Amino acid sequence: MSLTPHGPGFSFIDAIDLLAGDPPRLRATKWLDPAMGFFADHFPHRPVMPGVLIIEMAAQASGALWGRLSGSESSNPIAFSLAQVLDFRLRHPALPGDTLVCEVEMEHDFGALAQFVVVVTLAGRDDVVARGKITLARPAP
């Protein structure tokens, strides 16, 4: 079962948990397999996950939350589009073998657009990898 509408080579989520609360939140995790292709060249002697892929993980987690809040079945995820990245700060490197934990909360639902607050941390540690806001757009009917 796919957790995102992406193919397996571009899915940056291994597992998700919908967290109870008001507003609802979602936690997504991704183990960074050292064999992932981007680690070979970014950077060869000190590989790190590209920041744009951390933002992509945040967008995928935000889409998973919005899809569940919209009634989408997890077996048929909606392909939301990334509309905007706001105040996103990369604070700590994500290295081969790390597990990223991405928590997202919907801040505003504007109908065709929704904005999410995102915090990405390292599993089992207090290190914040990134934080910011993501705006997604619904697909056109």
Image (cartoon, helix red, strand yellow):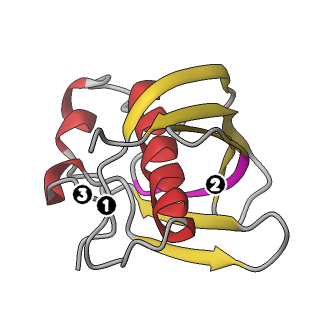
The segment highlighted magenta reads 97-107
Q: Residue at x 40, y 71 (%)?
A: 72
Q: Is residue 134 left or right of residue 136?
A: right
Depth check, front residue: 54 or 4? 4
Give the SS element for disc 3. loop
- Image quadrant where residue 50 sits: top left
Please say if the residues under marks 1 and 2 sit with CB atoms less than 8 Å apart: no
Report the amino acid beneath label 3. Answer: Pro
Q: Position of residue 105 (x, y in %)?
A: 71, 54
Q: Position of residue 32 (x, y in %)?
A: 38, 55
Report the amino acid beneath label 2. Answer: Leu
Report the amino acid beneath label 1. Answer: Thr
Q: Residues within 10 Å of mark 2 (few under 14, many from 20)?
A: many
Q: Residue at x 40, y 42 (%)?
A: 138
Total number of numbered labels?
Answer: 3
Per the image, the residue denoted by label 1 is 4
Per the image, the residue denoted by label 3 is 5
Per the image, the residue denoted by label 2 is 122
